[in-house]
Structures are given as C-alpha cells and as structure tokens.
Image: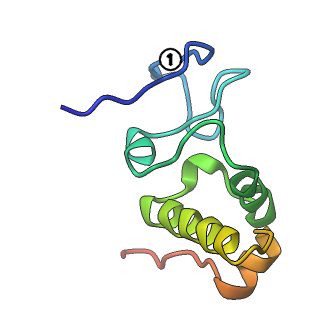
Amino acid sequence: MIFYEVFTAMHIIIPSEIHRLHQPPQGYVTFFKEQIIDNLRFSIHPFFSGVSRYFHIFLCQLTSNFIRILCGFVFICRLCDIRSTPRLFHYFFTSRRQSEGL
C-alpha cells in the first residue's frame, strides 16, 4: 500500500458538483490524484508556476507526462548549473493542443 504525506498546513477538500476545475473555491487550487502519484509535490517549484504563467495554462491541466518532462528539465538544468526558466524550456520544447478525436 502506498501512502502520500499531506502537510498539516494544507487543507484538502473533495470537490462537489458546484466546483469546477478552472474555478476552485476561493483560496484553493485544483490538482488530481494522478498528478501527485506522478511526482508533483508541494510546495511547487517556482519553475512550474512560471511555466504555467508563460504558457497560460492552469497547473491542474498538466498531464503526467508533462510533469515528468518538467521534473527532468529542472534536474538537467541543476546538473548543468543552468537556471531553469520557462523561456529556456520553450526553446527546447513546444507545447501544442491535441486535435479533436485523439
């Protein structure tokens, strides 16, 4: 059995039918269990927030593969002693929307 630690300073709520992905209750942020399982951790690295603002996407919209790519990018940048920035990330990677029906 796998357990995930949640810091006591965090308050987790289970969404109800009135909550929407892009409009969580005031003071809350939406994340999925799969994102936590795939290594998204709190507090969130500033690079993740920067990528979210740079690409104009909500953090909750990051897919598992994208989270892994971001983690790998931060790791490689640290290894090479390079500052990880959204602009540098965009130089190496391009995001695109999937076509309908895929």
Say what secondary structure mark 1 lies in: loop
Q: Residues within 10 Å of mark 1 (few under 14, many from 20)?
A: few
Q: Position of residue 96 (x, y in %)?
A: 59, 79
Considering the image in quadrants, where does the N terminus appear? Answer: top left
- Placement of 7 over or under 83, stated as above or below: above
Q: What percent of the width, then of the height, locates residue 28?
A: 66, 25
- Residue furthest to the bottom: 92
Total labels: the figure holds: 1
For residue 33, which quarter of the picture?
top left
Residue at 55% over, 57% down: 62
The residue under label 1 is 13
Tell me if residue 10 comes above or below residue 84 in the rendering: above
Q: Decide which of 15, 2 is in the foreground and name it.
A: 2
- According to the image, what is the colour scheme of the structure? rainbow
Residue 72 appears at what percent x and percent y?
54, 69
Residue drawn at point x = 72 percent, y = 57 percent: 52
| Three-letter code for the amino acid on which mark 1 is drawn | Ile
In screen coordinates, is 9 left or right of 99?
A: right
Between 63 and 2, which is closer to the camera in this rendering?
2
**Residue at (57%, 35%) from the top-left corner?**
30
Foreground pick, 27 / 19: 27
Quarter assignment of residue 3: top left
Q: Residue at x 36, y 76 (%)?
A: 102
- Pick whichever, 55 or 19, lies toward us: 55
